[in-house]
Structure formats: C-alpha cells, structure tokens
Amino acid sequence: LIVAKGDKAHKSLAEQLKSRELKRRYFALVHGNIKEDFGTVSTNIARSPSDRKKMAVCQQGGREAVTNFEVLERFGKYTFVACDLDTGRTHQIRVHMKHIGHPILGDKTYGIKKEEFNLGGQLLHAGRIGFIHPVQEKYMEFSCPLPEVFDKILEVLRKRMC
C-alpha cells in the first residue's frame, strides 16, 4: 500500500505505474510443477462474461496484462514462484496463474475447490515494491517477509522433499 500525501506525489506515482517504472514483486505457491524456470504471461483481462465478480483472460477487448514469473522452488505437486508485474490489473496474478494451468493454492475463486491444506486464504503475498520517491527523487524499495502461514506450508513441503 502506497499513500500519496499530495497531488504531486499522486501524479508521480500514477505516472510511474503507467510507464511501468513502479516495480512490484509477489510470491505465490501454485498447484502443479511449472516446467520452465522463467516465463511471461501476456494476455488481455476483462470481467468474466459468466460471473461479474471474476476477471478472465479474453480474446477481444479487455486491458493488456503482463506477468513475469520465476520459479523459486519445486515441490512436485506445487511450485513456489515470484511474479513481477508489468501491469496492474484486478486479480492479474490469480487469473494468469489459472490461465497457464497453475492456480494459486488456497484461491477459492480461481483455484481448485478441494485443497490438501486447510487454508483461510490464498498463498499470494505482495513481497516487494520499488519506486522513485516523488519528493526525494531517488529510488526506494520496501519489502515484507512472507506471512507465517505461508512459511509453514513451505516448511512442510521442503520436509516432504527430503
């Protein structure tokens, strides 16, 4: 969450987002084994025609959405990934991961209904954001560690792999 305290700051941050200078890295645990070490999902995303509460990849219309992913660890049935966003669409990572056949663990909207783990939410975490400070005009980056529940699931999966 970034709060702009004035109009100048707001305009600066909005422009960085538009010009793709604002850097965002998310971490996710997804279903399945992603074979590639790196990849890019580039589609258009719009409201789902069958469910107005959901977003979906669309062939015509919608808005451009680009997600770059990097595999951090593989656990057989699951893959731990970092996702860097070129764009910022509603539910973008969730929609893109489902689109490539690897929905996010715990995602009741876009994911698998019957989960192995009893999670209260999805394992998707906003881990880092970087931008040029609107007043100081220097690049700043802020990060946040994984939530405890995310760490615990990774621990369980790592022990299984031993």
Image (tube, rainbow, N blue to C red):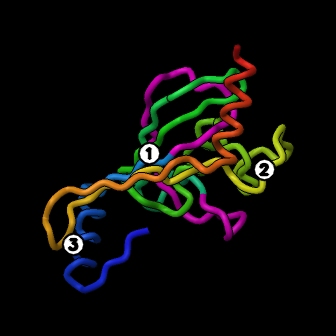
Side of 45 where 87 appears, left or right: left
Measured as percent of width and height from the top left, residue 75 is found at 66, 23
Asked if residue 70 lies in the magenta stretch, the reply is no
Residue pictured at 36% horizontal, 55% vertical: 142
Q: Which mark is residue 67?
A: 1
Q: Nearer the viewer, mark 1 or mark 2?
A: 2
Position above or below: 9 against 27? below
Measured as percent of width and height from the top left, residue 60 is found at 49, 56
- Report helix, strand or loop for mark 1: strand
For marks 3 and 1 on the same chain, the one whose residue lies earlier in the sequence: 3
Q: Quadrant of residue 109?
A: bottom right
Residue pictured at 72% horizontal, 55% vertical: 121
| Spatial separation of the CA atoms under disc 1 and disc 2 | 25 Å
Q: Which residues are magenta?
A: 27-55
Position above or below: 46 against 42? below
Asked if residue 39 lies in the magenta stretch, the reply is yes
The crowding category of the residue bearing disc 1, from other C-alpha atoms within 10 Å (few below 14, some 14 to 19, many at least 20), is: some
Q: Residue furthest left?
A: 137
Q: Which mark is residue 12?
A: 3
Q: Nearer the viewer, mark 3 or mark 1?
A: 3
Q: Residue furthest top?
A: 162
